[in-house]
Amino acid sequence: MSIYIDPDAVSRLRQYEMPGKLGFGRVIAPVMFRAVCQDGCWSRGELVPYTALSLDPAAKVLHYGQSCFEGLKAYRTPDDEVALFRPEKNAARMAYSAKRLCMSPVPESLFLDGVRTVALYCANLVPANSGESLYLRPFLMGTQADLTVSASASYMFYVIASPSEAYHAGNMRLWVERDDTRAAVGGTGDAKVGGNYAASLLSTGRLRERGYDQSLWLNPANRSSVDELSGMNFFAVMGEVLYTPALNGSILEGVTRASLIELARDRGYQVVEGEIHINELLKQVASGVCSEAFACGTAAIVSSISVIGDAGGSYRLSKAPGPVAQSLRQALLDIQEGRAEDRYGWMQLLGAITNI
Ligand SMILES: *Cc1c(COP(=O)(O)O)cnc(C)c1O
C-alpha cells in the first residue's frame, strides 16, 4: 500500500530548526506516521504534522491498558546515509506484545513503512556525533470508546521520533528489589507494554531516595534469581565468561541483549544464559570473582554497573566502567554507525540524506 505524505508535514520539516541542546527523548520531531485499524483492517499509513491526539475519554487504552510500544534508533553513517538497526526485530516484538494484550498486531510491512518513512523524512534531524541518533518510538493503542472490559475493535498506530544525544547513564548503581515485582509469571513481563513500566516506578522512586539509579528485579516466581532492570537486560562478567539470565517469560528479550550475545561469542567469550542467584552473585562480587557487570538496551546501548545495593550492604564492582562492557559497546556502535563491516546483516540502509 502506498504511503500518503501530507504536504504540511514536508513544510513543517523544511521550516524546522534543531535546538542546540538535545538530551535524550526530550526534543520531538515535527512529523509523525500514523495508521488506524478497524476490525482487523489497517488503513494506509500517513506522514502528518506532529500534533496532539484526539481520543474519546472512554477509549479502552485509558482504562484497561491496551497499549504497547517499541524503541529503536536511526543512525547516520560516515557516507551520510540513514540506517536502521534490526527494525524487523522490533516489528516482530511489537506483534508479540500486541497479541499478548489481545490487540490487532501491526503488520510487519506497515511497521517497517512507519519507521522507514519517519527516519527518511527526518534524515536531516539525525545528529552526526558518535552516540547520537534519531530515536524512534512506534506505539499502538486500543481506541474503541466504551467501558466494557473487552478487546478493542479499533486501534491507532503511531511512530514519533526524537533526535537524541548519547544516553549517558554513566556507571549505574543498582538496588536489589526484594519486595515488588515488575512482571508476573504468565503475565506481561516478556511483552513491551506500558503497564510494566508503571509497575516499576514506585520501586525506582524509593531507591533514588537512597542514592541508587535503577532496580535490579528478581524473578517473580522464586524471588531469588536475577531477571533484569526496568528497561535494560543484565550481564555479569566472571573471567572470560559472560552470564545473563535466560529468557524465562518474565524477562523482555532485548534486541541489544541478543546482538551482544552474538558479538561476544564471536569475540571469543563464552556466554551462559541461565539462572543467576542473587545471593551467589553478591558473594561473587564481594570476593572479586565477579569484577564487572553491565546492563544493555537500545537507549544506552551498554552501561556499566558500579554498585549493587541490598538490605545487607552494598557491593562494589571492581571494574566500572568495565573493559568487556566498553569493548562490546564500541563494537556494536561501530556497526550501527557504519564504521565496522556489518557481517551480521543487521543494518538497513535507507538511502542518502538529501534535502527534502
Ligand atoms: C525495551 C526493554 C529492554 C531492552 O530492549 P532493547 O530491544 O535492547 O532496547 C530490556 N528490558 C525491558 C523491560 C525493556 O522494556
Image (tube, rainbow, N blue to C red):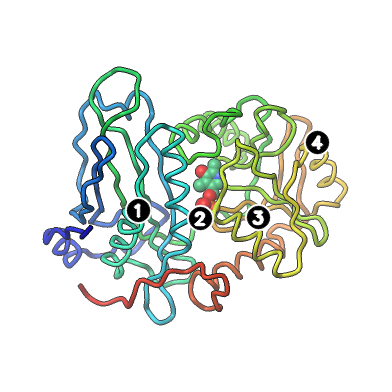
Splitting the image into 4 quarters, where does residue 133 fall? bottom left
Q: Is mark 2 within 8 Å of ligand 1?
A: yes
Residue at which label 2 appears: 298
Q: Nearer the viewer, mark 2 or mark 1?
A: 1
**Residue at the image point whose x is 23% and y is 65% from the top:** 17
Q: CA distance from mark 4 to mark 2?
A: 28 Å
Q: Identify the amino acid type marked 4.
A: Asn
> Does label 2 or label 3 sit earlier along the sequence?
2
Left or right relative to 229: residue 121? left
Q: Are marks 1 and 4 in contact (CB under 8 Å)?
A: no
Residue farthest to the right, as pictured? 287
Q: Nearer the viewer, residue 92 or 181?
A: 92
Quick check: 34 left or right of 95?
Answer: left
62 relative position to 287: left or right: left
Q: Residue at x 62, y 39 (%)?
A: 211
What amino acid is at disc 1? Phe
Circles 4 and 2: CB distance less than 8 Å? no
Q: Nearer the viewer, residue 93 or 319?
A: 93
Tag 3: residue type?
Ser
Work out how far the residue at label 1 is from the one at label 3, CA to CA, in angstroms. 32 Å
Distance (Cα) linking label 2 and label 1: 18 Å
Q: Secondary structure at mark 3?
A: strand
* Type of the residue with mark 2: Thr
Residue 102 horizontal/vertical position (percent) = 40, 32
Q: Earlier in the sequence, mark 2 or mark 1?
A: 1
